[in-house]
Each structure stands twice: as C-alpha cells, then as structure tokens.
Image (cartoon, rainbow, N blue to C red):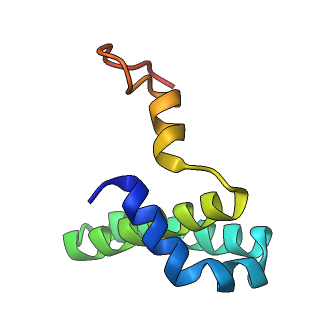
Amino acid sequence: MEIKEIQEEIKRMYFNKDRERGIFATFTWLTEEVGELAEALLSGKKESIEEELADVVAWTLSVANLEGIDIEEALRKKYNLSSNEKGRIP
C-alpha cells in the first residue's frame, strides 16, 4: 500500500469528523499524539512506540486532508524523491 492509498483510507474513515472538529482541534490531537510518542520513546517499549508512530502518521494525514495536501507529493517535492538524487537534508 502506498502513502497516497493510506491517506485516502484515512480520509474515507475520518474526514467528516475532522472537518467538524476543524483544523486547529485536529492539529491539537496531532500534537497530543506526538507527546504520547515521546512518552513511548522514553519507555523504550517497541510496541508502544509502534502504536504512537502510527497515530502520529494518521493524524498528520488528517491534517493534510483538511488542507487538501497530497502528502506523498509533498514528500516527493520536499525530499526530491522523484529524481535519482538522494534528496536533500531539510
């Protein structure tokens, strides 16, 4: 499954709720998940880290969906992934 497909699935499942919640509340959820990821990293528990990484990605995709951003394309542009070059350091 490609990033674009995952983004579409997240949109299908959550877009209406995210739109009702609004961009700033949705972003707040994302930041909360980043905090939970930090806690998981401190705990060193791989399963918790995995779950929280998935949450951070899902909420990031929700924010991108609300803003009408194709995150796969944004990654390709930002990191020059469409060419044979290694990409640039942000």
Q: Position of residue 23 (x, y in %)?
A: 76, 68
Q: Examine the rendering and report whether any part of residue 15 can be seen.
A: yes
Q: Position of residue 57 (x, y in %)?
A: 45, 62
Q: Position of residue 87 (x, y in %)?
A: 38, 20
How many numbered circles does the render carry?
0
What residue sits 67% from the left and 86% below the top? 17
Q: Position of residue 40 (x, y in %)?
A: 36, 71
What residue sits 52% from the left and 29% below the top? 78
Please, which residue is most extreme toward the left here?
Answer: 46
Q: Examine the rendering and report whether any part of residue 36 can be seen.
A: no
Please, which residue is most extreme toward the top here?
Answer: 85
The residue lying toward the viewer, choosing from 32 and 19, is 19
* Figure quadrant of residue 14: bottom right
The answer to whether residue 82 is above or below residue 35 is above
What residue sits 77% from the left and 84% below the top? 20
The answer to whether residue 62 is above or below residue 75 is below
Left or right, 29 with respect to 55, comes to: right
The residue lying toward the viewer, choosing from 41 and 77, is 77
Quadrant location, the N terminus: bottom left
